Image (tube, grey):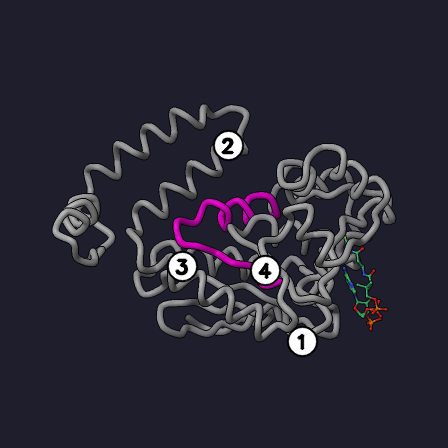
Amino acid sequence: MENFRNILTEEKESVLYLTVNREDKMNALNFETLEELREIFDEVVDNKDIKAVILTGSGDKAFVAGADIQEISELNEVNARKFAENGQEIFAMIENCHKPVIAVTNGYTLGGGCELAMACHIRIATANAKFGQPEVNLGIIPGYGGTQRLTILVGRGKANELMMTGDMIGADEALQLKLVNYVLPTKADAIDKAEEIIAKIMSKAPLAIGMIIDCVNAAFLSDENGFQTEANSFARCVKSGDYVEGTSAFLEKRKPIFKGE
Ligand code: COA
């Protein structure tokens, strides 16, 4: 995959490493960076060589310190709605991607940065990470899905408190609130942990992984019956060669070799 102006890309052993690379702006998400994310995830869906994604921010200070406040300061009522819908659409692409996407949140993970991390399937924080939805300080609210995903992840009371106060919390509190899965001392440790999890996931049946992502996401949607999605997805798994391979391997007391078909 090519490199983009604001996002570094590197492929290693079927894992795509993405680094938001606007270090002088705390990796803030401007419109161009969001569009690069759209282009990248469009390709991730179809590219058979990419089996997982690790997303992080450049440097040690920030994962992403929010949407770009310069751009936010120029919005009007009409394009503000589009601004929010556009970000929501791109983050939904990440959330619905059938390949695991892990956010390594190295430092400030604020506003649109926290929303971006929450759209990923798993979050691993560095010890210096700080999380928050400080939009209220700018007279606005989260617009890239934060009001919904934060509420589901940490519950109504804490979500209200975090969004209404704009307070930042540290990595340990984020872990306690289940906003992140793990806290590791450094970015290198956090990437190691992400790679360990991905290696485990990549040894499983890819179609089943995609179905798990769909079903877990269905639990977020009030207009979808998640149990029905689960039953339908379960039935789709049973049509796959990986199902035959997985069950046969168990009965034959050998390791399965999954092909993703
Ligand atoms: N959008 C645009 N620029 C941003 C930014 C954002 N969300 N966050 C940081 N930056 C820029 C700063 O303007 C500054 O640029 P400059 O050097 O050209 O002046 C640079 O990044 C460094 O930030 P600075 O504020 O000097 O660093 P700090 O260590 O003192 O503070 C933060 C770091 C993250 C606490 C602080 O930058 C901040 O509060 N950022 C905004 C967070 C936010 O409100 N996000 C939600 C947006 S909807």
Could you tell me if the residues under marks 1 and 4 are in contact, i.e. CB atoms within 8 Å? no
Work out how far the residue at label 1 is from the one at label 3, CA to CA, in angstroms: 26 Å
Q: Is mark 4 on a helix, strand or loop?
A: strand
Q: Residue at x 71, y 57 (%)?
A: 172
Pair 3/2: label in front: 2
Q: How far apart are marks 3 and 2 (CA)?
A: 26 Å
User: Disc 4 or disc 2, which is closer to the eye?
Assistant: 4
Residue 223 image point, x, y percent: 51, 24
* In the image, residue 245 above or below residue 217: below
Identity of the residue furthest to the front in this view: 253
**Residue at mark 3:** 43
Q: Give the range drawn in magenta.
A: 87-105
**Which sits in the foreground, 10 or 203?**
203
Give the CA separation, mark 3 to mark 4.
24 Å
Disc on the earlier residue, 1 or 3: 3
Q: Residue 124 carries which label?
A: 4
Number of residues whose C-alpha sits closer than 10 Å to that of mark 1, classed few (under 14), some (14–19) or many (20 or more): some
- Type of amino acid under label 2: Ala
Q: Amino acid type of disc 4?
A: Ile
Tell me the residue that label 1 is attached to. Answer: 59
Is the C-beta of the residue carrying label 3 under 8 Å from the nearest atom of ligand 1? Answer: no
Q: Residues within 10 Å of mark 3 (few under 14, many from 20)?
A: few
| Local SS, label 1 | loop
The residues bearing labels 4 and 2 have C-alpha atoms spaced at a distance of 22 Å
Nearer to us of marks 1 and 4 is 4
Residue bearing mark 2: 219
State the image coordinates of residue 47 (x, y, percent, origin top left).
34, 60
Ligand 1 picture quarter: bottom right
Residue at 40% in and 54% down = 99
Please state if 247 lies on the left or on the right of 146 as rendered: left
Residue type at tag 1: Gly
Question: Residue at horizontal 62%, vertical 66%?
Answer: 184
